[in-house]
Image: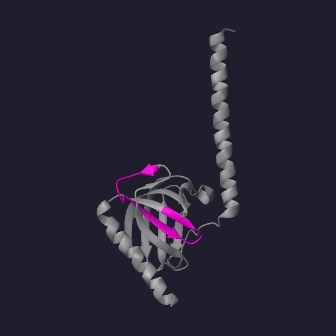
Amino acid sequence: MSWEVSLITLALFVIALSLFGAWRGWSSRTRAQQQEIPAIPQALEQFGNLVSEVRCLYVATTKSSNHLDRITAHGLAFRGNAELRIFDNGLLITRDGERPIAIPSDKILDVKRSTAVIDKGVETDGLLTIDFESELSVHLRVKNQDQVLSTVSAIELLKKKREQFSE
């Protein structure tokens, strides 16, 4: 066997080993997060009236304290097209090919605009970040940027209603 064939064989082995290590690390991370983080509801107990609906890109779910720490558990790992529906009683994020994410209004802690998360950087305030209980944040990129302010206002109104009822 020539040295060229040996070198190619060694390179393919190193690549295969690297891919296996990456897959194993991702799997271990997902298992650990499934133990640590409770599953996110897929539907609200009562939806109420539909307030607003926007097409968006689901970018990631991260820990609220560290937007570089992607949550991979419970089907939250992958980016994709989504629709954010704002109801009287909470939010419903339906993602193409993935389980929906439901956030009851009493679990919403904050809504803000941000510029970067994990592996996505956009123009200033191009991402919508929703912090909710369990110390998690969902990051969305609204496709029609003209709808961002009205979406933030609608979610803030949900928070205010929750705060009024808890007093």
Where, by quadrant of the figure, is residue 129 drawn? bottom left
User: Which residue is at 52% across, 72% downward?
Assistant: 103
Q: Nearer the viewer, residue 34 or 63?
A: 63
Quarter of the picture containing the N terminus is: top right
- Looking at the picture, how far across and down is residue 126, in whole percent? 36, 58
Residue 104 left/right relative to 111: right
Residue 9 seen by the camera: yes
Where, by quadrant of the figure, is residue 114 drawn? bottom left
Q: Residue furthest top?
A: 2
Q: Nearer the viewer, residue 81 or 9?
A: 9
Q: Nearer the viewer, residue 70 or 68?
A: 68
Residue 49 seen by the camera: no
User: Which residue is at 68% across, 32% downward?
Assistant: 17
User: Which residue is at 65% across, 54% downward?
Assistant: 30
- Looking at the picture, how far across and down is residue 99, in whole percent? 55, 61
Number of numbered discs visible in the structure rendering: 0
Applied colour scheme: one colour
Q: Is residue 108 magenta?
A: no
- Looking at the picture, how far across and down is residue 80, in whole percent? 47, 53
User: Which residue is at 66% across, 8% downward?
Assistant: 2
Boundaries of the magenta span? 120-138
Relative to residue 15, is residue 104 depicted above or below? below
Q: Is residue 128 magenta?
A: yes
Q: Residue furthest bottom?
A: 167
Where, by quadrant of the figure, is residue 134 drawn? bottom right
Q: Residue furthest front?
A: 65
Q: Nearer the viewer, residue 102 or 107?
A: 107
